Amino acid sequence: MRRGVPIVGLEPSCLFSLRDEFSVMLPGTDKLAKQAMLFEEFLAREADAGTLALEFKPVADEALLHGHCHQKAFGAMGAVERVLALVPNLRVTPIEGSCCGMAGSFGYEAEHYEVSMKMAEASLLPAVRAAAAGSGIHSETAMKLAGIFSSASSARGRVSAIASFMVRMRT
């Protein structure tokens, strides 16, 4: 903590619990909470500081973006959009809507399948189906449904999923 090393989280609900609730439960841990950030927030911070040495290539004209409920609630979608803006010639179109119905254990439990699908059908899945051919889709729900994102348990999986949306075009 003294060196200011960031704590990078991959799952928004877990990370925001650390950032928002940790200091309430364990007084004196404010500095730890302030160093906690999502992967996308870390990339955006590094890009803003001019220290992100990644070169992106154009891969799609448009990317549909559906944020995690916790990212929306904590105002963290701006970082996701800033990172996606690093991809040349990519227009990011947010999918306005509520819960995707698949977050956390709720989305993985078979007994919630019908409710989960109804939630996704409220706005996310219709937007995905209506997307123009050649659009990329950045949504953990869409990636789960497409079978390219099975868990947020590793940075490699998260990076792979984010990269996969860039190269998989809707057909």
Image (tube, grey):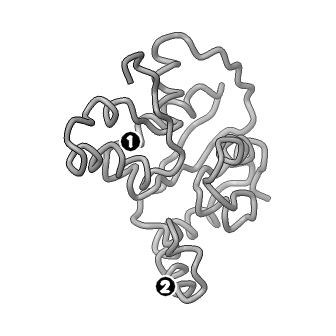
Helix, strand or loop at label 1? It is loop
Residue 79 percent location from the top left of the image: 45, 34
Query: Residue at horizontal 73%, vertical 64%?
Result: 146
Residue 19 percent location from the top left of the image: 33, 43
The residues bearing labels 1 and 2 have C-alpha atoms spaced at a distance of 26 Å
- The amino acid on which the numbered mark 2 sits, given as a three-letter code, is Val
Query: Residue at horizontal 75%, vertical 56%?
Result: 170
For label 2, the residue is 115
Q: Is residue 9 above or below residue 141?
A: above
Relative placement, left or right, of 41 versus 2 is right
Disc sitting over residue 76 in the figure:
1
Along the polypeptide, which appears first: circle 1 or circle 2? 1
In terms of depth relative to the viewer, which is nearer, 72 or 124?
A: 72
Query: Residue at horizontal 48%, vertical 55%?
Result: 95
- The amino acid on which the numbered mark 1 sits, given as a three-letter code, is Ala
In terms of depth relative to the viewer, which is nearer, 59 or 31?
A: 31
Q: Is residue 157 above or below residue 125?
A: above
Badge 1, how many Cα within 10 Å: few under 14, some, many 20+?
some
Question: Total marks drawn?
Answer: 2
The C terminus lies in quadrant: bottom right
Relative placement, left or right, of 11 versus 133 is left
